[in-house]
Image: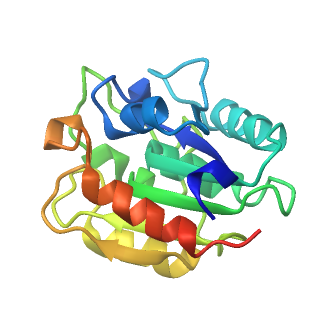
Amino acid sequence: MRTSDVDILIVPGRSGSGPDHWQSRWERTLKTARRVEQENWEEPEREAWVSRIIEAATQSTRPVVLVAHSLGVAAVAHVASRIPKGFLSGAFLVAPADVDAAPGWPETDGFQLDGINSGFAPLPLAPLPFPSVLIASSNDQYCSLDRAKAFANAWGSTLVEAGDVGHVNSESGHGPWPEGVLRFGTFLSTLTD
């Protein structure tokens, strides 16, 4: 598949990915990409986030590929068991947030996620019913490489170890992220209708 063959649903993490974030850039440059908008980006709640993703996917008219980052990856893991079979063609999962270890995360803008009370923890570890690739960093503050490997193994995702690249966001220098665009194109080429 090519980008013109699919509906690309951008699934950001908390705060919704700012204007310089690679997800926002992809949304602006890929004609078939659109963001799954959440009612509350600052205080995430699993049920609300999952419902919005399912709604966006089931309203699409072409095959759907999710592009998730951080807490968006956790939301996709929860979506997998609830969305009707066949609505998702694949998922490109970047820098997962290990919600089970949220108490050890750095505080961000005065916010500390409570994975249990927000509903995101525990993170589902059932195989995803669609192809996926998981991009993981070896020095991500929100998910250790060992946990990312465990997620990829449990979900049946192809793991890509990206090296010491932080949380793969604007703060870690990943605005345009050309390597990600190439990796996403390669992933799309493996998908079939």
Image quadrant of residue 7?
Answer: top right
- Residue furthest out toward the right: 84
Seen at 45% across and 70% down, the residue is 186
* Quadrant location of the C terminus in the rendered image: bottom right
Q: Is residue 166 left or right of residue 145?
A: left
Seen at 38% across and 30% down, the residue is 17
* Quadrant location of the N terminus in the rendered image: bottom right
Q: Position of residue 147 (x, y in %)?
A: 35, 70
Q: Is residue 61 left or right of residue 170?
A: right
Seen at 55% across and 35% down, the residue is 118
Q: Looking at the image, can residue 113 be seen?
A: no
Query: Looking at the image, is 161 positioned above or below residue 173?
Result: below
- Name the one closer to the observer, 104 or 169: 169
Q: Looking at the image, can residue 56 be seen?
A: yes
Q: Position of residue 25 (x, y in %)?
A: 37, 33
Image quadrant of residue 120?
Answer: top right
Snapshot colouring: rainbow
Q: Position of residue 188 (x, y in %)?
A: 55, 65
- Name the one closer to the observer, 151 or 135: 135
Seen at 52% across and 49% down, the residue is 67
Q: Position of residue 153 (x, y in %)?
A: 49, 81
Q: Is residue 13 left or right of residue 188?
A: left
